[in-house]
Amino acid sequence: MVELKGYKVNRLEIENKVKAGTQLKLQNQVKYNMNYMEGDNKCVSFLELRVSDADQNPFEIRIEAVAEFSYSEGDEKADIHVNSFDQLFPFIRQIISTAASFTGMGGLLIPIIRLNKNTVKVAGVGDNDNESSPLN
């Protein structure tokens, strides 16, 4: 069972230079990586999300966040990856909505993003055994 232990936002950037009333066609780009601390059944995720306008209007939100999770012995890494993202993303989504409201874009709510377990690539085991949590 994957459990979110904590998260923090390392970077949040907003550009909103569009004229009032401009209709935006938002697109999202997401990058989500996981580092495992095998002996402790912990992992740390790194999320980068960019929301921009498909028509190149001067609107963009970038957020970088890090989160720490615990998981149960025997959990598959692809499942951990997907489940951890599903737990973290609602917080990121709310932060983006709140930040956008400060720029006069009330009601901006990006769509829910779902990762596909079958497309998750798992790197070598034990690559980061000595890593400490960046949440400290």
Image: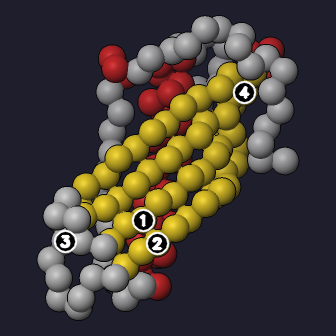
Residue position for label 2: 14
Tell me the kind of residue under disc 1.
Ile
Q: CA distance from mark 4 to mark 2?
A: 32 Å
Describe the element under mark 1 as helix, strand or loop: strand
Residue 34 image point, x, y percent = 59, 29
Q: Is residue 74 above or below residue 93?
A: above
Residue position for label 1: 61
Question: Is residue 105 rendered to the left or right of residue 23?
Answer: right
The label shown at residue 12 is none
Q: Earlier in the sequence, mark 4 or mark 2?
A: 2
Q: Earlier in the sequence, mark 2 or mark 3?
A: 2
Residue placed most toward the observer, 18 or 4: 18
Q: Residues within 10 Å of mark 2 (few under 14, many from 20)?
A: some
Instruction: Tell me if residue 94 can be seen.
Output: no
Q: Earlier in the sequence, mark 1 or mark 4?
A: 4
Residue position for label 4: 42
Residue at 46% x, 85% y is 102
The label shown at residue 24 is 3
Q: Residues within 10 Å of mark 3 (few under 14, many from 20)?
A: some
Residue at 31% x, 61% y is 52
Q: CA distance from mark 1 to mark 4?
A: 29 Å
Q: CA distance from mark 4 to mark 3?
A: 40 Å
Residue at 41% x, 21% y is 120
Tell me the kind of residue under disc 2.
Ile
